Amino acid sequence: SSTHSILRVCLRRVRCPVFLSACIGLQACSGPIEGSMEGGGNVADLIAGHVIKAAEEREAELDEELRRLDALKEDDLEEIRRKRLEQMKTRASERQKKLAQGHGDYEMIEEKDFFSVAKKSENIVVHFWRESTWRCEIMDKHLRQLCQKHWGTRFVKINAEKAPFLAEKLHIWCLPSLVICKHGKTDHTVVGFSEFSNGDEVSTEEVEEVLAKWGAIGPID
């Protein structure tokens, strides 16, 4: 099949005869190296031997992979395609379900809605903010970007001044604060910019790294 042929061609292109020739000619090209290794061989001989051995081992691995591909039948390739298509459909369905729950967006919620929102999503990041606090706007900017990239996590914000019960219960004493909830329970709070090396000059990438560190979002590619 065309897919089979493409795989074989890609593997063959990994091989490099010129590289092997260069290895074999290493001693001649580099010239003799002063001094000799114990046993009579010089350094160039030793290096060339190791490099050629490594290249031969890689060649053997590629040959084995080509034999495996030769053994694949059209039915096997069709089964691989089918499974991959199923995975894509499952992921697309999961994404649509998450988006319907508010994932992929960054919105304000009321204090009374906090617990129901926390129960509906496996992971949520709650930004406790205040409109008059300019540093909260900095965090807003980063979360607006991350909510679209990491749609598996729900991103919301709550006005701390209008949520006195939650602020007291979750020990919110500094703004902004990011409360990470997992499976309906609070797991960790990022207080202000204390966990960022550049303080309030933090980049979106560093905010992403800290959230990944605490398991609020999936691993970063």
Image (spheres, rainbow, N blue to C red):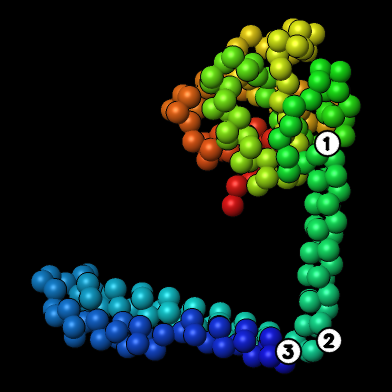
Which mark sits nearer the N-terminus, 1 or 2?
2
Residue 107 position by quadrant:
top right
Residue 33 position by quadrant:
bottom left
Residue 54 appears in the picture as rendered: yes
Dot 1: element: loop
User: In front: 92, or 55?
Assistant: 92
What residue is at 76 percent from the left and 7 percent from the top?
164
Q: Amino acid at mark 3?
A: Ala
Mark 1 vs mark 2, CA separation in Å = 40 Å
Which mark identifies residue 45? Answer: none
In this rendering, is residue 85 above or below 126? Answer: below
74 with respect to 12 (left or right): right
The residue under label 1 is: 121
Q: Position of residue 51 (x, y in %)?
A: 36, 76
In this rendering, is residue 165 above or below 183? Answer: above
44 with respect to 33 (left or right): right
Dot 3: element: helix
Dot 2: element: helix
Mark 2 vs mark 3, CA separation in Å = 11 Å
| Viewer-side label of 1, 2 | 1
Which mark identifies residue 71? Answer: 3
The residue under label 2 is: 75
